[in-house]
């Protein structure tokens, strides 16, 4: 049985599509969402989970009422406690962690502590608390499978039973591919005034709004570099970012003998999701077979750090260590939200991120409270800076 945290999101809906295609193998134990009552209701009526959770208590009340009106007696839980309960419940063996942002940390950790197989889409939880998270995975004997397409690709290109340090598996470095997002070739002067609508129109991947903006600033690739360091026990200099606009090669592993293994496929998240669900077997995901002749050409280029300063900031945060990564993640969430609400210009996302990262001291991550405190301090300072006249919406 599977629990899907963030069922109403882009990853959540793709996961349910894979479940739908393989209904003989998978049943849904729990579905969760923040406040999208009507969509979660429809999903509950179709997939008949035992439990539904709404993080927002008022939405939980609405869902209870709507389920009763539809003759359903599914139990509805609420709040972070409800999410944690659904994530750790005995009935589910698989947990898809697909809540967006820092809100995913505690529910995902609950699944780790219950020793589940975790399909990790919520990269922010690893970015914030990587050391504690990975330590909990090994202490509770959880099985962590990366769903982020790049990390899933790397996982697929590593030796099947690797448990040793990655260097002993003969890995020289990994290459994270990046599409470059919607603004890879946009005139730099024009970038200042791009709208949220343009930033969210990703050329290859339809995704939630937060990760779409992160892809447009390339903060997403920075967060993914951090994610890769924790997942595969790599040093930042062993992670290289390559722009690959077609998004066909999802990432590569470079071995010391000169072999470079890549995982390819059409850009559709149902491939890594199905891989995680069935591992070590393979199941139908609904993704179209790759037609290389039709694609014709695969291109590669180096990332331009002047265009994408957020990418450098992520590497700076890794170098600073400790809570710096939680600080960067938190200010970035505030900055993206402000941009989506037209309270901050696109290029100011990087400026706000830099100011907060530089202003707050990083501390060692020795317990979860440290991480949560750093997250809160960064959000508070970011909100305060947003009131400053320097920051604001100048576009249309
Ligand atoms: P989304 O915005 O489409 O969906 C987010 C989900 O989280 C929704 O179900 C929402 O109800 C829930 N949610 C939001 N705030 C919450 C809160 N405070 N408490 C509880 N639930 C909350 O996001 P998405 O694009 O599906 O991305 C989800 C995660 O997967 C992100 O961490 C993202 O980085 C990662 N990811 C997504 C993709 C993709 O293709 N969409 C690819 C790789 C990784
Ligand atoms: Mg990715």
Image: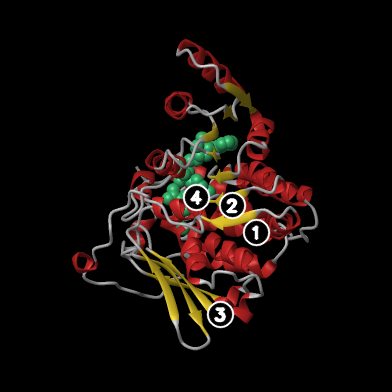
The residue that mark 4 highlights is 277
Alpha carbon distance from label 1 to label 4: 29 Å
Q: Quadrant of the N terminus?
A: top right
Q: Secondary structure at mark 2?
A: helix
Return the disc, 3 or 1, that comes first in the chain's sequence: 3
Q: Quadrant of the C terminus?
A: top left
Q: Secondary structure at mark 3?
A: strand
Alpha carbon distance from label 4 to label 2: 21 Å
Alpha carbon distance from label 2 to label 1: 9 Å
Counting other residues with Cα less than 10 Å from the Cα at mark 2, is it few (<14), some (14-19), or many (20 or more)?
Answer: many
Q: Residue furthest bottom?
A: 257
The residue that mark 3 highlights is 171
Identify which residue is drawn at 35% across, 44% down.
Answer: 197
The residue that mark 2 highlights is 124
Q: How is the image coloured?
A: secondary structure
Return the disc, 2 or 1, that comes first in the chain's sequence: 2
The residue that mark 1 highlights is 325
For label 2, being within 8 Å of ligand 1 is answered yes
């Amino acid at each position: 049985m599977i629990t899907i945290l963030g069922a109403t999101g882009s990853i959540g809906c793709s996961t349910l599509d894979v479940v739908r295609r393989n209904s003989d193998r998978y049943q849904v134990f729990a579905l969760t969402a923040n406040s999208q009552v009507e969509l979660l209701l429809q999903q509950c009526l179709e997939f008949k989970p035992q439990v539904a959770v709404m993080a927002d208590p008022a939405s939980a009340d609405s869902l209870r009422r709507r389920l009763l009106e539809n003759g359903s007696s599914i139990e509805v839980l609420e709040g972070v406690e409800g999410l944690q309960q659904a994530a750790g419940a005995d009935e589910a063996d698989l947990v898809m962690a697909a809540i967006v942002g820092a809100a995913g940390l505690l529910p995902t950790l609950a699944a780790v502590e219950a020793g589940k197989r975790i399909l990790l889409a919520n990269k922010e939880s690893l970015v914030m608390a990587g050391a504690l998270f990975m330590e909990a995975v090994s202490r509770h004997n959880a099985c962590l499978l990366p769903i982020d397409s790049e990390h899933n690709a790397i996982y697929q290109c590593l030796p099947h039973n690797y448990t040793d340090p990655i260097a002993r598996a003969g890995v020289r470095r990994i290459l994270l591919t990046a599409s470059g997002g919607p603004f890879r070739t946009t005139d730099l002067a024009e970038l200042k005034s791009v709208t949220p609508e343009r930033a969210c129109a990703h050329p290859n991947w339809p995704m939630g709004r937060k990760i779409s903006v992160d892809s447009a600033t390339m903060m997403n690739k920075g967060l993914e570099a951090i994610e890769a360091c924790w997942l595969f026990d790599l040093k930042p200099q062993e992670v290289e970012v390559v722009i690959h606009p077609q998004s066909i090669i999802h990432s590569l592993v470079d071995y010391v003998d000169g072999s470079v293994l890549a995982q390819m496929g059409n850009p559709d998240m149902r491939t890594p999701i199905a891989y995680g669900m069935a591992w070590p077997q393979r199941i139908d995901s609904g993704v179209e077979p790759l037609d290389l002749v039709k694609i014709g050409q695969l291109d590669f280029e180096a990332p331009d750090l002047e265009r994408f300063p957020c990418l450098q900031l992520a590497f700076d945060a890794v170098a600073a260590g400790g809570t710096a990564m939680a600080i960067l993640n938190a200010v970035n969430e505030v900055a993206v939200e402000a941009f989506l609400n037209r309270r901050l210009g696109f290029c100011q996302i990087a400026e706000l991120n830099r100011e907060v990262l530089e202003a707050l001291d990083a501390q060692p991550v020795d317990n979860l409270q440290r991480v949560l405190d750093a997250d809160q301090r960064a959000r508070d300072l970011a909100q305060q800076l947003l009131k400053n006249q320097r920051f604001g919406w100048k576009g249309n």
